[in-house]
Image (tube, grey):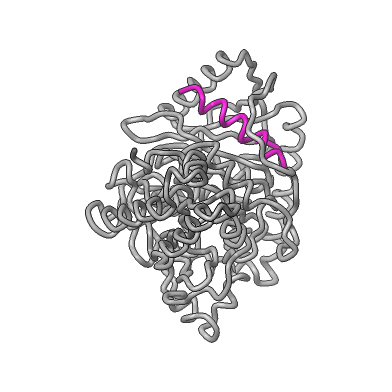
């Protein structure tokens, strides 16, 4: 039996029943990381490996052997984006600013994973301080796309996503500010979820933009995604915006649902594939689709970046070289520095009201537009990315890179939940189909995604 081919849900049951050793599961991943991350394909998805992972897995096996109750993630291997604090592991945000800095505590999501006997395998590469959409801005080199090694994997959760796609872990954590989970998940052919704003505690997340950030899950399947989300979700007193929306995440077959679609929003080959998938979905489950129009959604990118620039600038003032590593302006790469300088300018009194405050007003309008539309339909289905990934190192303008998140940014502005899952391939490259549901409707979102996944 090849345990690497089993789903996370299947593995947990096998580990609980003693049919699979947690140690064997973890050893298998560590061997894969050594073989294809550092050597061989040199995917460069994992920056740091947890040298206590096998020891932690042994403790899970001992609990099983002694008949003690084990957690819902018993013996599963989980990779963590390097902007989420894991105690005693280097949490660098893929930046020279925090190189060699080890987190002194576990983020709330990590504590919840460990309470359920999940094993942290290591820290994933990413775009520096989550600034980027390709996986190329890391101070430690770009992550490669496991599907096609010469292509970008997408970003900023590049290493987490590539780790799932390459078989380095059962599950992974990423963060999503404007598509940073869904963008790479689309390009690497995996499932990527951005929960509703406040659905998961962000305590211990080194933030990019606190009015938009959300920790989410990357996985091979929808059910695996739901498994981890159910563990990390919920109210946390250390994150004031966190809420408990669902008592338990439930993935179930839904009855009559209304599907919202929008006018073509992507390049032709990608849009054609998504339209075909939507038609197949509606035909199988006897559903009808309805054209919807989100007013002002064309302003999403222009609204997003002033918010990100200002909030990044504010959030990085603590990296002054006294408490953490080096001063961020001295350790930053070009993209991070561009955003810090932009935020510094917008924050000046004569610009703050003109740009940041106006962006917050438009964000609120878009949020209310989603609330209106989700009174008419249960979900909206659109492509995840407007096109296909480019080659690593290919010259792309800032405007082209920023516009690439045009289909994912709206969900963050609207504070709603969104998921991407594989829809097929164009020119041998994975393409993701994105499902959006209303704020707090994460169980419904996963249920619809599972129905689409079952079309295979």
- Where in the figure is residue 428, as x and y percent of width and height? 31, 32
Q: Is 295 placed left or right of 88 in the picture?
A: right
Residue visible at 55% across and 42% down in the picture:
225
Toward the bottom, the furthest residue is 322
Q: Position of residue 203 (x, y in %)?
A: 65, 64
The answer to whether residue 182 is visible is: no
Q: Which image quarter is the C terminus in?
A: top left
Residue 220 among magenta residues: no
Say which quarter of the image contains residue 387. Answer: top left
Q: Which residue is situated farthest in the front direction here?
A: 66
Name above or below for residue 8 compared with residue 232.
Answer: above
Q: Nearer the viewer, residue 370 or 267?
A: 370
Task: Decide whether the magenta segment is chiefly helix, strand or loop.
Answer: helix
Quadrant holding the N terminus: top left
Depth check, front residue: 12 or 343:
12
> What residue range appears in magenta?
437-456
Inspect this view and state whether residue 36 appears: yes
Q: Looking at the picture, does residue 215 appear above or below residue 340? A: above
Q: Position of residue 260 (x, y in %)?
A: 65, 26
In this rendering, the count of numbered labels is 0
Q: Which sits in the foreground, 397 or 290?
A: 290
**Image point (56%, 52%), residue name:** 67
Report x, y in % for residue 310: 62, 65
Residue at x 39%, y 63% (from the top left corner): 138
């Amino acid at each position: 039996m090849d345990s690497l081919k089993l789903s996370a849900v299947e593995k947990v049951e096998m580990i609980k029943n003693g049919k699979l050793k947690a140690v064997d599961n973890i050893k298998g991943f560590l061997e894969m990381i050594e073989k294809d991350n550092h050597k061989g394909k040199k995917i460069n998805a994992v920056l740091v490996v947890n040298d206590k992972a096998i020891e932690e897995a042994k403790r899970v096996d001992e609990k099983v052997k002694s008949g003690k109750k084990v957690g819902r993630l018993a013996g599963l291997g989980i990779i963590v984006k390097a902007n989420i604090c894991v105690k005693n592991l280097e949490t660098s945000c893929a930046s020279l600013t925090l190189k060699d800095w080890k987190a002194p505590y576990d983020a709330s999501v990590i504590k919840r994973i460990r309470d359920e006997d999940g094993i942290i395998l290591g820290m994933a590469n990413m775009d520096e301080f989550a600034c980027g959409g390709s996986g190329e801005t890391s101070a430690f080199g770009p992550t490669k796309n496991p599907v096609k090694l010469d292509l970008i994997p997408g970003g900023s959760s590049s290493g987490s996503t590539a780790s799932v796609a390459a078989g380095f872990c059962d599950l992974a954590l990423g963060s999503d500010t404007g598509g940073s989970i869904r963008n790479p998940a689309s390009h690497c052919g995996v499932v990527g979820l951005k929960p509703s704003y406040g659905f998961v505690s962000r305590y211990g997340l080194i933030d990019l933009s606190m009015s938009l950030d959300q920790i989410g899950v990357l996985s091979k399947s929808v059910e695996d995604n739901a498994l981890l989300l159910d563990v990390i979700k919920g109210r946390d007193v250390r994150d004031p915006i966190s809420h408990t929306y669902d008592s338990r995440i439930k993935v179930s077959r839904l009855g009559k649902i209304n599907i919202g679609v929008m006018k073509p929003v992507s390049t032709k080959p990608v849009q054609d594939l998504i339209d075909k998938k939507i038609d197949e979905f509606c035909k199988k489950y006897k559903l009808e689709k309805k054209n919807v129009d989100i007013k002002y959604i064309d302003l999403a990118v222009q609204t997003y970046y002033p918010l990100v620039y200002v909030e990044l600038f504010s959030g990085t003032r603590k990296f002054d070289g006294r408490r953490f590593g080096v001063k961020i302006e001295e350790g930053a790469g070009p993209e991070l520095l561009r955003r810090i300088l932009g935020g510094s300018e917008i924050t000046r009194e004569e610009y703050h009201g003109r740009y940041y405050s106006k962006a917050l007003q438009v964000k609120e309008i878009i949020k209310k537009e989603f609330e209106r539309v989700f009174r008419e339909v249960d979900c909206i289905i659109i492509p995840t990315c407007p096109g296909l990934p480019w080659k690593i190192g290919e010259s792309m303008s800032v405007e082209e890179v920023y516009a690439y998140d045009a289909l994912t940014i709206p969900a963050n502005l609207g504070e709603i939940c969104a998921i991407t899952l594989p829809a097929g391939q164009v020119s041998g490259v994975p393409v993701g189909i994105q499902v959006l549901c209303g704020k707090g409707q994460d169980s419904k979102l996963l249920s619809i995604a599972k129905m689409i996944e079952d079309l295979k």
